[in-house]
Each structure stands twice: as structure tokens, then as C-alpha cells.
Image (tube, rainbow, N blue to C red):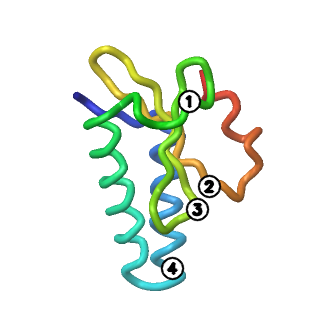
Amino acid sequence: MIVRFIEPALTELHEAVNYYDYQLPGLGLRIFHEVNVSIKKITDMPEAWTKIGENTRRCLLKGFPYALLYIIDPQVILITAVANLHRDPEHFRNRTF
């Protein structure tokens, strides 16, 4: 199954990687790795994760306060947010369907 990021989610991923790499060199690579591990889990079992909207699901990242918000389409898994869980959830509300 194809995985795609909408532009705001891709920006959030870059911001998270840069933030953690600034805090400790190499930590940005770890969060990037955890995102990839989570994407693999999602593609293996797309409906296994918590539903937070009619069509949106949430997969928590291990070791970081982030979650991937995504929508399952017949051909594509669309990542709508790389959500910082310390941020106000209203920030992501317009990307949950």
C-alpha cells in the first residue's frame, strides 16, 4: 500500500526531526526511524489503530510524544498530521475526517 503525507504533515515531520536533532545530535534520526516503524505497522494493519474521527486513525510513536494521524483510502494511506501530543488538539482538528 502506498503511503503519502499531506504537506502540513510533511512540514511537521521535518520540524520534529530538526527540533530533536538540535536537542541532541542523532535524536532527530531516532524520531525519523520511529515514524518509519509506525508507518510499517500502519501498512501491515491499517485498521488496528485508534479511531479518532469518522475516517481518521491515530498511531502513537514509541518513545516520543507524537502520533501519526492518517486516513485509509483503498489505494493509499494518507498521513494527515505528525501530531505533537503536547500541542492543542484543535491545531489538528481540521485534518481529522
Identify the amino acid type marked 4.
Tyr
Disc number lying in front (4 or 2) = 2
**Foreground: 37 or 48?**
48
Q: Nearer the viewer, residue 75 or 62?
A: 62
Q: Residue 84 — which label?
A: 2
- Disc 1 secondary structure class: strand
Whole-angstrom CA distance, mark 4 to mark 3, is 17 Å
Q: Which residue type carries mark 2?
A: Asn
Q: Which mark is residue 65?
A: 3
Residue at screen point 46% across, 37% down: 49
| Residue at the farthest front position | 48
Residue 55 is situated, as x and y percent measured from the top left of the image, at 53, 20
**Which residue is found at the position 41% from the left and 84% from the top?**
25
Q: Residue at x 37, y 71 (%)?
A: 30
**Mark 4 or 1, nearer chain start:** 4
Q: Are marks 2 and 3 in contact (CB under 8 Å)?
A: yes
The nearer-to-camera label among 3 and 1 is 1
Q: Residue at x 48, y 44 (%)?
A: 59
User: Tag 3, which secondary structure?
Assistant: loop
Disc 4, SS: helix
Using the numbered discs, state the Cα–Cα distance from disc 2 to disc 1 in whole angstroms.
17 Å
- The disc, 3 or 1, on the residue closer to the chain's N-terminal end is 1
Q: CA distance from mark 4 to mark 2?
A: 17 Å
Mark closest to the chain's N terminus, 2 or 3: 3
